[in-house]
Image (cartoon, rainbow, N blue to C red):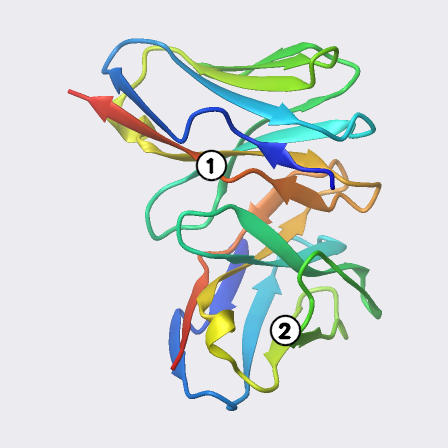
Amino acid sequence: NAGVTQTPKFRILKIGQSMTLQCTQDMNHNYMYWYRQDPGMGLKLIYYSVGAGITDKGEVPNGYNVSRSTTEDFPLRLELAAPSQTSVYFCASSTPAGEQYFGPGTRLTVT
Amino acid sequence: GESVGLHLPTLSVQEGDNSIINCAYSNSASDYFIWYKQESGKGPQFIIDIRSNMDKRQGQRVTVLLNKTVKHLSLQIAATQPGDSAVYFCAENMDSSYKLIFGSGTRLLVRP
Protein backbone atom coordinates (compact mmCIF):
# COMPACT_ATOMS: atom_id res chain seq x y z
CA ASN A 1 0.00 0.00 0.00
CA ALA A 2 1.25 3.48 -0.85
CA GLY A 3 -1.05 4.93 1.82
CA VAL A 4 -1.95 8.59 1.28
CA THR A 5 -0.16 10.33 -1.57
CA GLN A 6 -0.19 14.03 -2.39
CA THR A 7 0.96 16.01 -5.38
CA PRO A 8 2.68 18.35 -5.90
CA LYS A 9 5.21 18.46 -3.06
CA PHE A 10 5.91 22.15 -3.56
CA ARG A 11 4.21 24.94 -5.47
CA ILE A 12 4.60 28.70 -5.82
CA LEU A 13 1.54 30.63 -6.98
CA LYS A 14 1.00 34.25 -7.86
CA ILE A 15 -1.90 36.07 -6.20
CA GLY A 16 -5.12 35.33 -8.04
CA GLN A 17 -3.93 32.10 -9.66
CA SER A 18 -5.76 28.84 -9.14
CA MET A 19 -4.58 25.30 -8.57
CA THR A 20 -5.69 21.87 -7.44
CA LEU A 21 -3.89 19.88 -4.77
CA GLN A 22 -4.26 16.18 -5.43
CA CYS A 23 -4.79 13.52 -2.78
CA THR A 24 -5.19 9.79 -3.29
CA GLN A 25 -5.45 6.93 -0.83
CA ASP A 26 -5.35 3.21 -1.56
CA MET A 27 -6.64 1.95 1.79
CA ASN A 28 -10.33 2.05 0.83
CA HIS A 29 -11.06 4.53 3.62
CA ASN A 30 -14.41 6.26 3.52
CA TYR A 31 -13.29 9.29 5.50
CA MET A 32 -10.88 11.82 4.02
CA TYR A 33 -9.71 15.22 5.24
CA TRP A 34 -7.80 18.31 4.22
CA TYR A 35 -5.81 20.29 6.78
CA ARG A 36 -3.54 23.29 6.62
CA GLN A 37 -0.62 23.84 8.94
CA ASP A 38 0.89 27.26 9.39
CA PRO A 39 4.46 27.59 10.74
CA GLY A 40 4.75 26.54 14.38
CA MET A 41 1.06 25.77 14.60
CA GLY A 42 -1.21 22.78 14.76
CA LEU A 43 -3.38 21.52 11.95
CA LYS A 44 -6.67 23.16 11.05
CA LEU A 45 -9.39 21.28 9.22
CA ILE A 46 -10.41 22.79 5.89
CA TYR A 47 -12.85 20.24 4.47
CA TYR A 48 -13.71 16.62 5.06
CA SER A 49 -15.65 13.84 3.40
CA VAL A 50 -17.38 10.80 4.87
CA GLY A 51 -17.75 9.06 1.53
CA ALA A 52 -17.88 9.48 -2.22
CA GLY A 53 -20.26 12.28 -3.18
CA ILE A 54 -20.34 13.77 0.34
CA THR A 55 -18.27 16.73 1.52
CA ASP A 56 -18.53 19.17 4.39
CA LYS A 57 -16.80 22.25 5.73
CA GLY A 58 -14.28 22.19 8.53
CA GLU A 59 -12.90 25.06 10.62
CA VAL A 60 -11.33 27.14 7.82
CA PRO A 61 -13.10 26.43 4.48
CA ASN A 62 -13.09 29.94 3.00
CA GLY A 63 -11.14 30.19 -0.25
CA TYR A 64 -11.20 26.44 -0.89
CA ASN A 65 -13.38 23.87 -2.59
CA VAL A 66 -13.34 20.09 -2.67
CA SER A 67 -14.95 17.23 -4.51
CA ARG A 68 -15.17 13.51 -3.83
CA SER A 69 -16.21 11.65 -6.96
CA THR A 70 -14.43 8.44 -5.96
CA THR A 71 -13.44 6.77 -2.70
CA GLU A 72 -9.76 7.10 -3.57
CA ASP A 73 -9.46 10.77 -4.57
CA PHE A 74 -10.13 13.98 -2.66
CA PRO A 75 -8.76 17.01 -4.53
CA LEU A 76 -8.58 20.47 -2.94
CA ARG A 77 -9.12 23.48 -5.17
CA LEU A 78 -7.89 27.03 -4.62
CA GLU A 79 -9.66 29.36 -7.02
CA LEU A 80 -8.11 32.77 -6.29
CA ALA A 81 -4.88 32.27 -4.38
CA ALA A 82 -4.12 34.80 -1.63
CA PRO A 83 -0.97 35.26 0.49
CA SER A 84 -2.96 34.07 3.53
CA GLN A 85 -3.15 30.65 1.89
CA THR A 86 0.60 30.19 2.12
CA SER A 87 0.85 27.06 4.24
CA VAL A 88 1.57 23.36 4.26
CA TYR A 89 -1.44 21.29 3.25
CA PHE A 90 -2.00 17.77 4.51
CA CYS A 91 -4.50 15.26 3.29
CA ALA A 92 -5.56 12.39 5.53
CA SER A 93 -7.84 9.40 5.46
CA SER A 94 -9.18 7.41 8.35
CA THR A 95 -10.19 3.93 9.36
CA PRO A 96 -13.67 3.25 10.72
CA ALA A 97 -12.06 3.31 14.17
CA GLY A 98 -10.92 6.89 13.57
CA GLU A 99 -7.12 6.65 13.27
CA GLN A 100 -6.09 9.15 10.59
CA TYR A 101 -3.26 8.47 8.16
CA PHE A 102 -1.58 11.53 6.70
CA GLY A 103 0.09 12.22 3.40
CA PRO A 104 3.53 13.87 3.14
CA GLY A 105 2.09 17.34 2.57
CA THR A 106 2.17 20.04 -0.10
CA ARG A 107 4.09 23.21 0.68
CA LEU A 108 2.34 26.15 -1.01
CA THR A 109 3.65 29.70 -1.26
CA VAL A 110 1.49 32.50 -2.64
CA THR A 111 3.35 35.69 -3.59
CA GLY B 1 -14.88 27.98 21.65
CA GLU B 2 -13.80 24.41 22.17
CA SER B 3 -10.07 23.92 21.92
CA VAL B 4 -7.20 21.61 22.60
CA GLY B 5 -4.03 23.10 23.98
CA LEU B 6 -0.66 22.12 25.37
CA HIS B 7 1.10 23.29 28.54
CA LEU B 8 4.71 23.26 27.30
CA PRO B 9 5.79 24.35 23.86
CA THR B 10 9.29 22.79 24.15
CA LEU B 11 10.52 19.87 26.22
CA SER B 12 14.21 18.96 26.45
CA VAL B 13 15.15 15.57 27.93
CA GLN B 14 18.28 13.49 28.32
CA GLU B 15 18.52 10.41 26.16
CA GLY B 16 17.33 7.43 28.18
CA ASP B 17 15.09 9.45 30.47
CA ASN B 18 11.31 9.30 30.37
CA SER B 19 9.37 12.11 28.69
CA ILE B 20 5.94 13.40 29.62
CA ILE B 21 4.02 15.64 27.24
CA ASN B 22 0.82 17.20 28.49
CA CYS B 23 -2.35 18.40 26.84
CA ALA B 24 -5.50 20.10 28.12
CA TYR B 25 -8.80 19.87 26.32
CA SER B 26 -11.95 21.84 26.91
CA ASN B 27 -14.68 19.88 25.11
CA SER B 28 -16.13 17.61 27.76
CA ALA B 29 -18.18 15.82 25.09
CA SER B 30 -15.07 14.61 23.23
CA ASP B 31 -14.77 10.87 23.38
CA TYR B 32 -11.70 10.07 21.31
CA PHE B 33 -8.16 11.38 21.61
CA ILE B 34 -5.04 10.79 19.56
CA TRP B 35 -1.36 11.60 19.89
CA TYR B 36 0.59 12.30 16.72
CA LYS B 37 4.31 12.69 16.11
CA GLN B 38 5.51 15.01 13.36
CA GLU B 39 9.09 15.04 12.17
CA SER B 40 10.43 17.96 10.23
CA GLY B 41 9.10 18.08 6.68
CA LYS B 42 6.77 15.14 7.16
CA GLY B 43 3.10 14.55 7.83
CA PRO B 44 1.83 13.64 11.31
CA GLN B 45 2.28 10.02 12.28
CA PHE B 46 -0.16 8.20 14.55
CA ILE B 47 1.33 7.17 17.89
CA ILE B 48 -1.48 6.06 20.13
CA ASP B 49 -5.14 6.76 20.80
CA ILE B 50 -7.55 6.43 23.69
CA ARG B 51 -11.28 6.52 24.08
CA SER B 52 -13.10 8.25 26.91
CA ASN B 53 -14.16 4.97 28.50
CA MET B 54 -10.52 4.30 29.36
CA ASP B 55 -8.04 6.18 31.53
CA LYS B 56 -4.84 4.52 30.39
CA ARG B 57 -3.55 2.80 27.29
CA GLN B 58 -0.10 1.44 26.60
CA GLY B 59 1.80 0.92 23.41
CA GLN B 60 5.40 0.19 22.62
CA ARG B 61 7.37 2.56 24.89
CA VAL B 62 4.42 4.94 25.02
CA THR B 63 1.55 5.35 27.43
CA VAL B 64 -1.39 7.72 27.17
CA LEU B 65 -3.24 8.79 30.30
CA LEU B 66 -6.64 10.41 30.24
CA ASN B 67 -8.08 12.31 33.19
CA LYS B 68 -11.61 13.29 32.30
CA THR B 69 -12.20 14.99 35.64
CA VAL B 70 -9.69 17.73 34.84
CA LYS B 71 -9.80 17.28 31.06
CA HIS B 72 -6.15 16.38 30.80
CA LEU B 73 -4.28 14.08 28.47
CA SER B 74 -0.64 13.08 28.68
CA LEU B 75 1.80 11.10 26.59
CA GLN B 76 4.60 9.28 28.36
CA ILE B 77 7.59 8.06 26.37
CA ALA B 78 9.84 5.59 28.15
CA ALA B 79 13.61 5.58 27.62
CA THR B 80 13.53 8.50 25.21
CA GLN B 81 15.71 8.07 22.14
CA PRO B 82 17.16 10.60 19.66
CA GLY B 83 14.64 9.34 17.10
CA ASP B 84 11.86 10.58 19.37
CA SER B 85 12.84 14.19 18.70
CA ALA B 86 9.84 15.71 16.92
CA VAL B 87 6.77 17.83 17.50
CA TYR B 88 3.96 16.02 19.28
CA PHE B 89 0.32 16.94 18.85
CA CYS B 90 -2.72 15.86 20.78
CA ALA B 91 -6.06 15.90 19.02
CA GLU B 92 -9.64 15.39 20.12
CA ASN B 93 -12.60 14.11 18.22
CA MET B 94 -15.38 16.53 17.41
CA ASP B 95 -18.15 14.14 16.40
CA SER B 96 -18.86 10.79 14.82
CA SER B 97 -17.27 11.79 11.53
CA TYR B 98 -13.93 11.69 13.37
CA LYS B 99 -13.11 15.32 12.64
CA LEU B 100 -10.19 16.17 14.87
CA ILE B 101 -9.20 19.40 16.59
CA PHE B 102 -5.44 19.62 16.99
CA GLY B 103 -3.46 21.40 19.66
CA SER B 104 -0.54 23.65 18.75
CA GLY B 105 2.13 21.05 19.49
CA THR B 106 5.06 20.43 21.83
CA ARG B 107 8.58 20.12 20.50
CA LEU B 108 10.55 17.31 22.13
CA LEU B 109 14.34 17.67 22.02
CA VAL B 110 16.44 14.69 23.09
CA ARG B 111 19.94 15.52 24.34
CA PRO B 112 22.60 12.85 23.66
Please indicate whether residue A76 sits to the left or right of residue A107 in the image. right
Query: Who is closer to the viewer here, A73 or A107?
Result: A107
The residue nearer to you, when weighing B78 against B90, is B90
Badge 1 amino acid: Gly
Taking the spot 39% from the left edge, 50% from the top edge, the residue there is B42
Picture coordinates of residue A81, whole percent (x, y)? 53, 83
Dot 1: what SS? loop
Q: Residue at x 56, y 24 (%)?
A: B23
Q: Residue at x 45, y 70 (%)?
A: A86
Quarter location, residue A22: bottom right
Q: Position of residue B45 (x, y in %)?
A: 48, 40
Q: Quadrant of the C terminus of chain A?
A: bottom left
- As drawn, the label of residue B105 is 1
Within 10 Å of the Cα at label 2, are there few (<14), some (14-19), or many (20+) other Cα atoms? some
Q: CA distance from mark 1 to mark 2?
A: 27 Å
| Mark 2, residue position | A75
Q: Secondary structure at mark 2?
A: loop
Amino acid of disc 2: Pro
